[in-house]
Image (cartoon, rainbow, N blue to C red):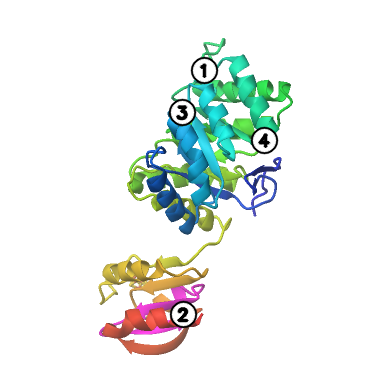
Amino acid sequence: MMKRRASKVISVGGVEIGGAGPIVVQSMTKTDTRDVKATVRQICQLEECGCEIVRVAVPDMEAARAIVDIKKGITIPLIADIHFDFSLALMALRSGVDGLRLNPGNITDAEQIARVVHAAKEKKVPIRIGVNAGSLPKLSNKKASVVQHMVDAALGEIRLLESLDFDLIKVSLKAFDVPTTVAAYEAIAKKTPYPLHLGITEAGLPWAGSIRSAVGLGILLNEGIGDTLRVSLTTPDACRDVEAAYEILKSLKLRERGPTLVSCPSCGRSETDIVGLAQMVEERLKGVEKTIKVAVMGCVVNGPGEARDADVGIACGKGRGVIFRKGEKVRTVEEADLLEALMAEVEKV
Ligand code: SF4
């Protein structure tokens, strides 16, 4: 069993991050923040699929002001993503935002940062120091590696915030490159007690991006590093990031949420279209909220035994299949009835 890194606990709009609490799943909207209706609609969709904190881009004053109305339509905490212009952070705070993300690479004026920090402190709003390998601040040590550069940028910003008597801090050091990301988080984890927000930045299209994120974040989480995470996939489907994040956490037994589908890869023993059946089951399980493990196996000989830990499953044979629970046969059904029989069994669990 992994030992979780001891970290401080901060509250982002009532959601606690850090300590021994659950690893919080975050996402970011893909809408124009100034379009309040579309942004609220997307956040509600994200809430439904399990997003616990949401971030919006704040590229201008209109977007910063829109936060007032967005907040009225949502229930999860809202974070403003600020780059370059500190006055957008001040406006976001005035608009009632629950958290800020500042990039130390593009807001560098200490006086401007101090103004934001004072305003955030007054409202007890946490700040994420969001270091990104692609937009690092200039550092005096020209020979530093990217990892060192990222860690130094984060530590410099932490020291600045602490010198202003501010400790509602969360830190991220994101890169596209998995070894760089892992090394940067491993290094910062030893140097600061603040909670860490994990992410592989610009991870890519859903298939490769999910694998890349699972490898990078999985390594860190398995080392006990990470208090919250966001998976960043290139997809119009807002929920894919959140679903991928939960799959990563579920794989490491760090969170439970909804059904888990176990399906065999099929082989020469199978006499059924196992791929088609597994896809249909996956589709039908989308509406199920209970935490349940469901198996779709390609043969009766090995299926029930191989998926013994599934709460309920089907093992397909020629023209018929077996419904099983925890590896024990419940009944035999005709092939045409397999899907409905399985879903009926899921209902019963
Ligand atoms: Fe092959 Fe049966 Fe195993 Fe599926 S469950 S991979 S069909 S042996």
* Label drawn at residue 137: 1
Distance of label 4 from label 2 (alpha carbons): 46 Å
Residue mark closest to the camera, 4 vs 2: 4
Q: Is residue 322 magenta?
A: yes
Q: Identify the mark nearer the N-term, 2 or 3.
A: 3
- The residue identified by callout 4 is 123
Range covered by the magenta-colored residues: 305-324
* Residue 144 coordinates in the image, percent (x, y): 54, 16
Look at label 2 and name its amino acid: Glu
Distance of label 2 from label 1 (alpha carbons): 54 Å
* Residue 346 coordinates in the image, percent (x, y): 45, 78
For label 2, the SS is helix
Crowdedness near tag 2: few (<14), some (14–19) or many (≥20) residues, C-alpha within 10 Å: few
| Relative height, residue 196 to residue 339 (above, below) | above
Residue mark closest to the camera, 2 vs 3: 3
Q: Quadrant of the N terminus?
A: bottom right
